[in-house]
Amino acid sequence: MAERIAASASLLPSAASPSSSTRRATVASGLRLRPSPSRFSQAASRGRGVAGAAGVVPRLRVVRCMAASEAAQLKSAREDIKEILKTTYCHPILVRLGWHDSGTYDKNIEEWPQRGGADGSLRFDPELSHGANAGLTSALKLIQPIKDKYPGITYADLFQLASATAIEEAGGPKLPMKYGRVDITAPEQCPPEGRLPDAGPRLPAEHLREVFYRMGLDDKEIVALSGAHTLGRSRPDRSGWGKPETKYTKDGPGEPGGQSWTAEWLKFDNSYFKDIKEQRDQELLVLPTDAALFDDPSFKVYAEKYAEDQDAFFKDYAEAHAKLSNLGSKFDPPEGFSLDDDKGAVATEEKVVADPAPASDTNGAGPQPEPFVAAKYSYKKRELSDTMKQKIRAEYEGLGGSPNKPMKSNYFLNIMIVIAGLAFLTSLTGN
Ligand code: HEM
């Protein structure tokens, strides 16, 4: 963590979140950072403390610049993201935002930011207008107020924080994230169009490998990351894929419409793999690239495993997501930093979710509707229905058990098994 001389008037980083070197150069020359032309970065820079009369020499003082983003601000931003999620159910689009910022990475290009990746470039119009990013403007609109509130964090970190928080809040695993990503500063630094995958290529498995291998990811990671489609919907007016609405999406929550991959599309679990494997429900979406996960022999090994074993999926997803979120990033400090002490722990069934406030807590406003909790299905242990309990009890008693005492062993059956075993052995020795 280097000590740097910074102009006190410029202590709040600009919306463009300049790199350390740019900040140093700015101070040395006494110039102010020019806001970027994007409407998002213009919004972010409105009312910032970088203003001052031309010709006034800024007071200089020594400050300790901790990192590209400040940990305390990231933590507060995370709480604000949780609030947005509770009211708008925008989990899926925030995940897509983070993925589309990082998924432009090309491991064959060494230079930053030419190599693409998680560098905040998706806030600039040239990249936002790429065909693959249709619809992501609304995600940016949702989180721009958070960027405005916390000027000490970069867009690159905010995008990845929003995505990771959305996964975790939807019931997914705890992700071993690190922060400190430096932002690119100008639209000219955006990656070229065409680096993200196409949903309907001629050879889907080959296409997936071509795109994800370029990012340095392997078959296991391709399959695990595709599991993010357990969340969200496809909309014909954005990507061109999916039905305008289905029985699962016509009433929202959030903006209604689109076609989801899973019935409970705000819950992060392994149902994506189960549903694609079965392909029984015409209301659910299967893109050609989704189907490839069960068609291609190498992908299929993982897809089958994840359909059977949610813990295995969560473990691999958490690792792959964290890796995806770091692609191409330049970190300051170079090793990045974590916001959690318990980084990387996979969420267990026991994870607690805040229950709705009791009616008496609502200032006499009467009973409130239960707030929608995206993750409630997977966080809590389910209580068996009375019918199911009766059925289990009947089966148990039918086998000689009783609810109040351990089941007696069935002596007659045991004797029969011993006799059969002895008869078998006798026949063997006779031969
Ligand atoms: C494997 C190659 C992939 C392809 C071809 C693909 C394609 C698509 C398409 C066509 C949509 C619909 C967009 C719309 O109409 O609004 C979509 C949505 C989505 N994608 Fe992917 N995707 C891929 C990988 C990923 C990855 C790696 C992630 C995250 C780790 C991801 C997360 C999402 C999410 C969460 C949505 C739902 C967005 C919403 O509901 O607004 N996708 N994807």
Image (cartoon, rainbow, N blue to C red):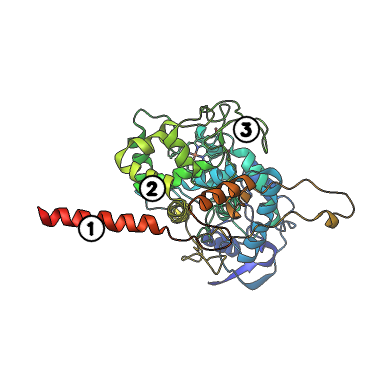
Q: Give the number of the mark in front: 3 or 2.
A: 2
Q: Note whether residue 119 is visible.
A: no
Residue 233 location, quadrant = top right
**Element assignment for label 1:** helix
What's the residue type where badge 2 is placed? Lys
Label ID, residue 341: none
Q: CA distance from mark 3 to mark 2?
A: 28 Å
Name the N-terminal-most of marks 1 and 2. Answer: 2
Q: Report the side of 125 relative to 196 (left or right).
A: right
Q: Position of residue 153 (x, y in %)?
A: 61, 58
Please give the residue where the numbered disc 2 appears in the rendered image: 305
Q: Position of residue 44 (x, y in %)?
A: 68, 50
Please give the residue where the numbered disc 3 appears in the rendered image: 249
Q: Please state which of residues 210 and 155 is positioned toward the viewer in this rendering.
A: 210
What's the residue type where badge 1 is placed? Leu
Q: Decide: is 121 above or below 381.
A: above
Neighbour class for label 1 at 10 Å: few (<14), some, many (≥20)?
A: few
Please give the residue where the numbered disc 1 appears in the rendered image: 422
Q: Ligand 1: does it lie within 8 Å of the C-beta at label 3?
A: no
Q: Report the side of 359 relative to 36 (left or right).
A: right
Neighbour class for label 2 at 10 Å: few (<14), some, many (≥20)?
A: some
Name the N-terminal-most of marks 1 and 3. Answer: 3
